[in-house]
Image: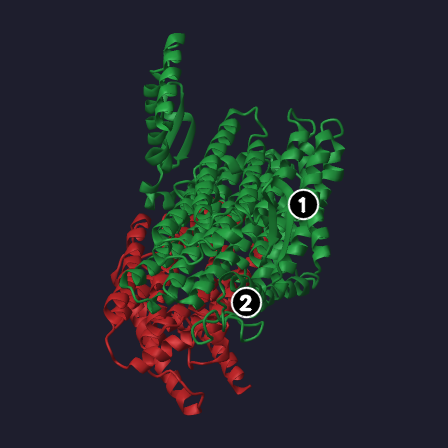
Amino acid sequence: MSHHLFVQMLAFALGGSLGSALVSLVADRYPRVLSRVAFPALAVAGAASVTIGLEAILTGGRFAVELPLGLPWLHWHLKLDPLAGFFFSLIGIGTLAAGLYGPAYCREFRHGPYSLAVLGLATGLFIAGMQLVVLADDAFAFMIAWELMSLSSYFLVGYQHQNAANRRAAFFYLLMAQIGGLSILLSFGVLAGFGHGFTFEEMRAAPLSLSWSSIAFTLALVGFGAKAGLVPLHAWLPEAHPVAPSHISALMSGVMLKVSVYGFIRVVFDLIGSPHWSWGVALLIIAGITALYGVLYALLQNNLKRLLAYSSVENIGIIFIGLGLSIIFYGTGQHLLGTLGLVAALYHSLNHMLFKSLLFLGAGTVLQRAREHDLERMGGLLKALPWTGLCFLIGCMSISALPPSNGFVSEWVTFQTALQATSLESGVLRAVIPITAAVLALTGALAAACFVKVYGVAFLGLARTRRGRRCTEAGPGMVGAQGMLAALCLMFGVFPTATVTALNHIVTDLTGHALTAATANGWLWLTPISSDTASYSAPLVSLGVLLSLAAWAVVYLVLRPGGHARMTRGDTWDCGFGPLNARMQYTSTAFTMPVQRIFKPFWDLREEVEREPRNGLPQEPERLRHQLHVDDISWRLLYTPVVKLLHATTRRVGRIQTGHLRHYLAYSFITLILLLWIIT
Amino acid sequence: MKIWALALLQSTAFVLLAPLFAGWVKWVKCRLQNRRPPPLAQPYRDLWKLFGKEALLSHNASILFRIVPYIVAGATLLAAAVVPLLAVNLPTAAIADVIVLTGFFALARFFLALAGMDVGTAFGGMGSSREMTISALAEPAMLLAVFTLAMVAASTNLSTVIEQVLSDGLVLRPSLLFALLAMCLVAVAETGRIPVDNPATHLELTMIHEAMILEYSGRHLALIEWAAQLKLMIYGVLIANIFFPWGIATTPTPVALLVAVAAITAKLSILGVLLATGESVLAKMRLFRVPAFLLLALTLGFVGLLSHIILEIR
């Protein structure tokens, strides 16, 4: 692609999102603008982003432009290298899905109390912000884009602001985003201070001592970790993601978290350059805790979108496990394995973007059609929403890491990287890495349990509400967006070799080290290290699964019209007690009860039992209501103490504010004298 | 070409002989308990009968309910295809390594658990919930044992692992001992045998696997039963061939294959006797004691891993 063409495509990508934001300004007056212009513009921006992103990955080209914006001495530098291209196309896929999904989904906001203009404007700016973060090639542009992304998403989280919980979630989100942003700024400050300049080019060349680079790493970890949702900085995520409109939840969970993963990779692997292995150990421990913590909390949630948000925490943990392994291996000179870890992390970023967006869009469809966000009141939705149900099943399979889905491949590659720990010199490292692998194994198994619960309770069984039974499938736009993501989930699961080849290009371009044997045996075989060490043939496995489906189809087609039906329908066996009803099914809380007993100390659980006594006899209550509240343990351990400390400090500082003018004059006078004294 | 034929033959043998192994375990168990055993071919007769019967379906069952038996059977079949029964270095073994193998089991379990919840009875949900809980601990325990093997052999390919153990000869590796113990506990839990689950019971308080498939009948039930028997045999073969690989054919010559047939028959017979004995002398555990059992497996797997790292690497 020529430079000229690139600039044109870039104009499409950025212009689409910014243009969508601009035209939305009139959406309150002409609501159709949102569905006719704003969302299609986003879809165009998404498609253009995917195109140039892929171009950058496949050709390994670098495209740079300098925009006449920003400070007088520092214009905005934008650059698209393969790494940025990869994340740029992730943003593109998410934007495309949101653009297809949005028109029908946002129709319900038309008659609501909220402003459509704010929705369209913030969505467009949010996407433009994410695109610019990935494109930015200097710290200044990066921070502006980062804040644009944070601020516009704040308005989206707080969009339905009549609900006090949403306002609270939005404020908390903004607070955490600012803390994270500050930390990133300081990290850039360290790099820019030594590199004497704010462009990434100069920061890359900064000569850093180990202690300064460790400081930069820690600051970057806190900053990007807060945005990505690493425990214990994750607490905003399960509050903020569920309350945003569903296509925004999909963008936030699926795409925005990946943008912070991008930022982390950019700073640690590119700007700092040569990561030290001890950072990897710290990262591995944090990531392991994050993964396990996320899945344990996801398991116990009854609000579908909140569950998905906790599951994002888990997946971010898995991605950072890959990054941690990569840092350890690079830091100890095992370049091949370091590359493999990075490839695993990128692969999982791609996968999580696909299946988490898919699942959030599915949850949005359920929310719109069945008006339900509580798993306890869903059920039987597969019959009412067959296509959404099919796509959601594919998403559940992928997130549970079942072969031949895409989620399995990335976890498998992560396992393969971890199992090479024996090649390390240090005994401690050799022990730490397998422990992480064990945590990852536990996480995967718990995630499968979690998503069996989700799918079984929500989509299978009997409908628990009348609306759940009567609702109808969503329109083609909403189903199409989910179908596209589901198809991509399958594609990246069935053809991992091609994907790994492309990811290998990206990592080679970034670090200068390539995988040698991973894809050497043709498109059928994925052999990360060598074909003796491990091999996986996703196409053949998929063929096996397809053959079993074909066997079903043959039986179905051959036996059905052949006169003897060999299949009788009857009522479900009720043990002779009378008809079964929907309330006798296992609920979401009931399903996780055994797990809850096993891992009890990990949650703050509050159980409430309400009894309505009949005729004053408490032992024979007329109605019994059992509720289980799951509180995030990080609140008790971290946030509440910090808030208390903050309150106590501010109260103490507040004492100097007496309210008398003379005191304030005295303060100004003293300050003035102090300053004069310092200057002279 | 010949070697692909051999691989196909091996998979077919796996599928055809799985009911026989289940029948053997039942036979030994009956003898141990002073009951008159059914003939060894009884599982075949049961399957034949089930395949001949019409399938009865609940009005509430969705299409998923009807597809699941095929996916379960297919996934288990795939698992059987990659496990070396008679010979190592067969081409099918490269399709999937041992981590993918646990993935196949996870796939089958995922869909079976979904099917349990599909009809909307309390039994089905109960079975699914329990099965997923148990597997949430059993699967990591299995993977830990697998990781130990993988680190010992520097490979996760089953063929390579077996060859490595063979070439080691009769050395005593503590890590493999722990991995073996972990694997045995996991096998008992995953195949639903006493003391974790009882394949012969239909008592609501104790059922796990049977509760999930309670609504199935006819050919659907036959497929699921067959898959369960296959799974039992796969675990048997894994334990027999990984930890005691002697006799397995390393070259595809007729003599080696005959030796391999004799060896695996002997090994599986002994394993069957051990399993039946265990099931006869142990009582079924309460459901909430099972996590302790599985945590033991997890711990054993972990100790195996650490003992390899600490003791066995130069």
Subunit that carries the residue with mark 2: A
If the image is split into quadrants, where does the N terminus of chain A sit?
bottom right
Whether residue A25 is visible = yes
Q: What element carries label 2?
A: helix
Marks 1 and 2 belong to one chain: yes
Along the polypeptide, which appears first: circle 1 or circle 2?
Answer: 1
* Nearest the eye: A253 or A485: A253
Whether residue A229 is visible = no
In the rendered view, tell whether residue A84 sits above or below residue B163: above
Q: Distance between the residues labelled 1 and 2?
A: 36 Å
Across and down, in percent, residue A248 comes to 59, 39
**Tag shown at residue A538:** 2
Residue plotted at (36% across, 27% down)? A680
Q: Is residue A169 left or right of residue A101?
A: left
Q: What element carries label 1?
A: helix
In the rendered view, tell whether residue B229 sits above or below residue B168: above
Across and down, in percent, residue B51 comes to 55, 66
Chain shown red: that is B
Across and down, in percent, residue B288 comes to 31, 48
In the rendered view, tell whether residue A65 sits above or below residue B177: above
Q: Picture quarter containing residue A54?
A: bottom right
In the rendered view, tell whether residue A353 sits above or below residue B16: above
Residue extending farthest front: A680
Chain shown green: that is A
**Tag shown at residue A134:** none
Residue highlighted by disc 1: A14
